[in-house]
């Protein structure tokens, strides 16, 4: 998902807290749904998981999961998807459940982000966002 492209960021995640987070995203690009991570996100910094224009990718919904080393999540998510304990890119098998455990992976609750019809979007992690 970390596609090359325009110099201006298309999907950024900014951490406005002092806590270190590890970030994973999920998205459907070219009719293939996948999750990818990890981006290390120290306090008061940003990362750019998707660098291409979101409208060029026909990408309205992006899913995000951000967690600390102790397992505290930055967001309350409703979408179960797979992550791994090390750097990963996991493609979902079309028309099949994720089956994370069967695949030797970890299930995580991702938050859906509706980017509308914009080409660029930024998600902020703030200290008061914790559930």
Image (cartoon, rainbow, N blue to C red):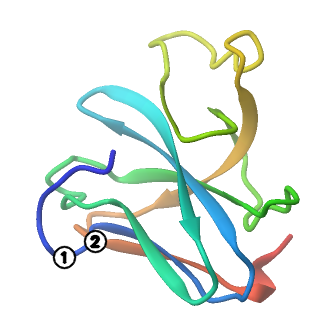
Tally the numbered discs: 2
Indicate the quadrant where residue 53 lies. Answer: bottom left
Point out the frontmost of discs 2 and 1: 1
The N terminus - image quarter: top left
Residue in the picture at 70% in, 38% down: 85
Callout 2 crowding tier (Cα within 10 Å): few <14, some 14–19, many ≥20: some
Residue on which disc 1 sits: 8
58 to 131, vertically: above or below = above
Of label 2 and label 1, which has the lower sequence position? 1
Can you tell which quarter of the image residue 94 is in? top left
Residue 64 drawn at (x, y percent):
57, 55
Q: Residue furthest front?
A: 86
Question: Which residue is at 56% across, 10% downward?
Answer: 96
Quadrant of image for the C terminus = bottom right
Classify 10 Å Cα crowding around label 1: few (below 14), some (14-19), many (20 and above): few
In the image shown, does 57 or 73 lie closer to the viewer? Answer: 73
In x, y percent, where is residue 39?
52, 59
- Indicate the secondary structure of the residue bearing disc 1: loop
Secondary structure of the residue carrying numbered label 2 = loop
Residue 91 is drawn in which quadrant? top left
The residue that appears at 76% across and 87% down in the rendered structure is 127
Q: Position of residue 115 (x, y in %)?
A: 39, 64
| Label 2 with label 1: CB-CB less than 8 Å | yes
Instruction: Give the residue at mark 2.
Output: 120
Is 21 drawn above or below residue 88 in the view shown? below
């Amino acid at each position: 998902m970390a596609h090359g492209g325009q110099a201006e960021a298309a999907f950024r995640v900014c951490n406005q807290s002092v806590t270190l987070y590890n970030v994973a995203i999920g998205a459907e690009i070219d009719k293939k749904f996948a999750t990818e991570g990890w981006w290390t996100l120290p306090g008061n910094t940003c990362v750019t998981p998707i660098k291409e224009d979101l409208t060029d990718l026909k990408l309205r919904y992006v899913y995000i999961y951000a967690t600390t080393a102790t397992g505290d999540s930055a967001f309350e998510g409703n979408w179960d998807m797979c992550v791994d304990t090390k750097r990963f890119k996991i493609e979902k098998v079309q028309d099949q459940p994720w089956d994370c455990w069967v695949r030797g992976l970890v299930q995580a609750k991702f938050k859906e982000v509706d980017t509308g019809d914009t080409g660029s979007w930024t998600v902020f992690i703030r200290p008061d966002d914790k559930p």
